[in-house]
Image (spheres, rainbow, N blue to C red):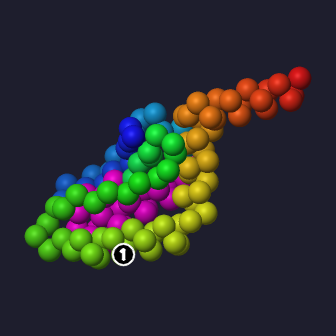
Amino acid sequence: MKKQILAMTSYKKQKYFIEPKFQILPEEVQKELKIMCVLTAQKLCCTFCVGFEENGDIYFETIEGEIDFDEIGAELEIKRIQSEKKEFLKALKLWYVVFFTEEGEKIKQELQKEKK
């Protein structure tokens, strides 16, 4: 499956990146995403990436950046995020599916037909 990066934060370089085509997200959503990424990268001392699978599923990746990187801790932190941010991630997936997939295009066409 083709993956698309949504946002990425580097603990070592102290930088945050959001893919330009996803900057159409509402400002509050972008803010929430940035906070989530930055805090996770700081906590894990790594580069932290959030993205979309082709079907809209959200994936998380950690890239080791420091000697004290803890893989097990990283997995636990990602599970915590998935649990605590469940509604946020669900809405983010729905947004992606509607605006960036063929399935979403069909949904938009059906809604336009109903309006007429």
- Does the magenta stretch mainly form a helix, a strand or a loop? helix
From the viewer's side, name the closer residue of 64 and 53: 53
Quarter of the rendering containing residue 91: bottom right
Which residue is at a point 37% across and 57% down the rendered structure image?
A: 60
Magenta extent: 26-49
Which residue is at a point 54% across and 58% down the rendered structure image?
A: 89
**Quarter containing the C terminus:** top right
Which residue is at a point 87% across and 28% down the rendered structure image?
A: 115
Is 95 on the left or on the right of 32, as rendered? right
Mark 1 sits on what residue?
Answer: 76
Tell me: residue 112, above or below residue 8: above
Residue 18, image x, y percentages: 39, 44
Is 24 on the left or on the right of 37, as rendered? right
Amino acid type of the residue tagged 1 in the rendering: Leu
From the viewer's side, name the closer residue of 108 and 55: 55
Residue 13, image x, y percentages: 19, 55
- Does any portion of residue 53 appear in the rendered image? yes
Q: Residues within 10 Å of mark 1 (few under 14, many from 20)?
A: few
Q: Is residue 24 magenta?
A: no
Tell me: residue 42, above or below residue 112: below
